[in-house]
């Protein structure tokens, strides 16, 4: 029987979005080649695993989707390949996972990041996907063919379908430096300048507090900004603050910094207690030393020190004011860490440049997925899940062609 020739797909980049796309594509329909500028695939994926390798989050789906900014852009992808679907897919691929106390999803402790990557690579090998490393994409020629530089010199590639998965601009040591934007500018594709996300934020601490509190955690607190609230943990640093509770507020903080040059977040040091309960406990101590009274609500030493560094002596001694500040302590942010110090970035190709299948409207047959698009998400597995979901979703769409 006559069989039509397979279509060729060139995937540029080899991060999680690219790997999942290649794993989803039907090898009976497509010949797939991944082009990677580094000497090995998925370097940022491996580096990210050094600090605790959470692959996704087990949160209920409707709330999960709302973690993204803007959430509607990624909704179809995530509903098509949910956090539950990812866990099943990983299990079927040989990666057993477990849900931690934070509800984050991790591979079993004996499975290292390289083990997860190798499971992907084995799957791609079985699907006859080629991975060509040390191939740096350098734009298009006049015929809209892809131009690469490799060890042998320039290489021209013509593919039926091109998918870009080039990442954002953080962690340049892994090759994620955002230099690809120059080539899209030449195609008049709108882009948003990259900005840091999930990063440390600068606070001009009192010198005495900073010297004694640097490196100390604020556990079991809640942080809020412009109506967005996140429970979790913060860490006091020489620069300011960092940690999951403030990372989740990155969009709101960035907006305030852009508009006002400063931003204000509010810390609830005891989210498990109501204001009335705290007021009652403080008032019941009578004329005792206020610091002793704070032991009644079990504030840590660093929490007490933080209150003292921000409040005047009069306010600290006034139990009514003190109770209010325990529940709603303002911290003024004056800046953020650099892009290269950030876990992720926001910015890149403007979302209006893609259709519902991530195809670039101005370049038919060319698609863009992953962190190179202008969306944002907190840490905790949400970033990886979005990349996996986008790759899987696009793969399913292309398989229908």
Image (spheres, rainbow, N blue to C red):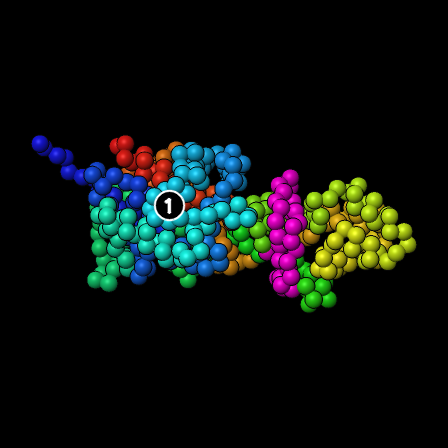
Dominant secondary structure of the magenta stretch? strand
Q: In what quadrant of the picture does the N terminus appear? A: top left
Whether residue 263 sits left or right of residue 351 in the image: it is right
On whether residue 322 falls in the magenta region, the answer is: no
* Number of residues whose C-alpha sits closer than 10 Å to that of mark 1, classed few (under 14), some (14–19) or many (20 or more): some
Residue 108 placed where, x, y %? 43, 52
Does any portion of residue 146 appear in the rendered image? no
Does any portion of residue 251 appear in the rendered image? yes
Residue designated by label 1: 90
On whether residue 233 falls in the magenta region, the answer is: yes
Whether residue 1 sits left or right of residue 305 in the image: it is left
Identified at 65% across, 50% down, the residue is: 220
Identified at 65% across, 64% down, the residue is: 214
Whether residue 319 sits left or right of residue 226 in the image: it is right
Residue 103 placed where, x, y %? 53, 45
Please state the extent of the stretch shown in magenta in the rendering. Answer: 214-242
Whether residue 393 sits left or right of residue 300 in the image: it is left
- The answer to which of 150 and 67 lies nearer the viewer is 67
Residue 380 placed where, x, y %? 51, 48
Element assignment for label 1: helix
Q: Quadrant of residue 287?
A: bottom right
Identified at 21% across, 44% down, the residue is: 31
């Amino acid at each position: 029987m006559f069989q039509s020739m397979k279509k060729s797909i060139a995937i540029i980049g080899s991060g999680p979005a690219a790997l999942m796309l290649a794993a989803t594509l039907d090898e009976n329909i497509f010949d797939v080649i991944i082009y990677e500028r580094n000497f090995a695939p998925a370097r940022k994926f491996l580096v990210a695993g050094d600090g605790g390798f959470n692959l996704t989050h087990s949160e209920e789906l409707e709330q999960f989707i709302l973690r993204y900014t803007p959430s509607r852009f990624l909704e179809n992808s995530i509903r098509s390949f949910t956090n539950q679907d990812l866990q099943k897919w990983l299990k079927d691929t040989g990666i057993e996972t477990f849900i931690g106390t934070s509800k984050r999803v991790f591979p079993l402790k004996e499975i290292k990041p390289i083990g997860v990557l190798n499971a992907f690579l084995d799957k791609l090998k079985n699907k006859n996907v080629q991975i060509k490393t040390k191939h740096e994409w350098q734009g298009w020629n006049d015929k809209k063919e892809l131009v690469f530089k490799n060890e042998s010199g320039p290489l021209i590639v013509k593919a039926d379908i091109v998918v870009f998965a080039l990442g954002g601009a953080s962690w340049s040591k892994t090759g994620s430096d955002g230099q690809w934007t120059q080539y899209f500018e030449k195609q008049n594709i709108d882009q948003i300048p990259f900005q840091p996300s999930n990063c440390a934020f600068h606070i001009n601490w009192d010198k005495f507090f900073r010297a004694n509190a640097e490196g100390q955690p604020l556990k079991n607190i809640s942080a809020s900004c412009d109506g967005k609230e996140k429970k979790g943990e913060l860490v006091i640093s020489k620069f300011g603050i960092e940690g999951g509770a403030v990372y989740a507020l990155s969009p709101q903080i960035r907006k305030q910094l852009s508009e006002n040059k400063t931003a204000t977040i509010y810390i609830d040091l005891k989210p498990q207690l109501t204001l009335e309960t705290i007021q009652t406990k403080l008032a019941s101590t009578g004329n005792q030393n206020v610091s002793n009274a704070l032991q009644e609500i079990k504030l840590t030493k660093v929490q007490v020190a933080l209150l003292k560094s921000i409040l005047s002596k009069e306010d600290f001694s006034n139990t009514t004011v003190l109770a209010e500040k325990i529940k709603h302590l303002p911290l003024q942010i004056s800046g953020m860490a650099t892009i290269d110090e950030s876990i992720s970035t926001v910015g890149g190709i403007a979302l209006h440049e893609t259709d519902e299948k991530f195809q670039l409207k101005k370049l038919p047959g060319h698609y863009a997925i992953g962190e190179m698009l202008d969306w944002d998400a907190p840490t905790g597995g949400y970033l990886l899940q979005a990349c996996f979901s986008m790759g899987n979703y696009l793969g399913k769409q292309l398989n229908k062609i």
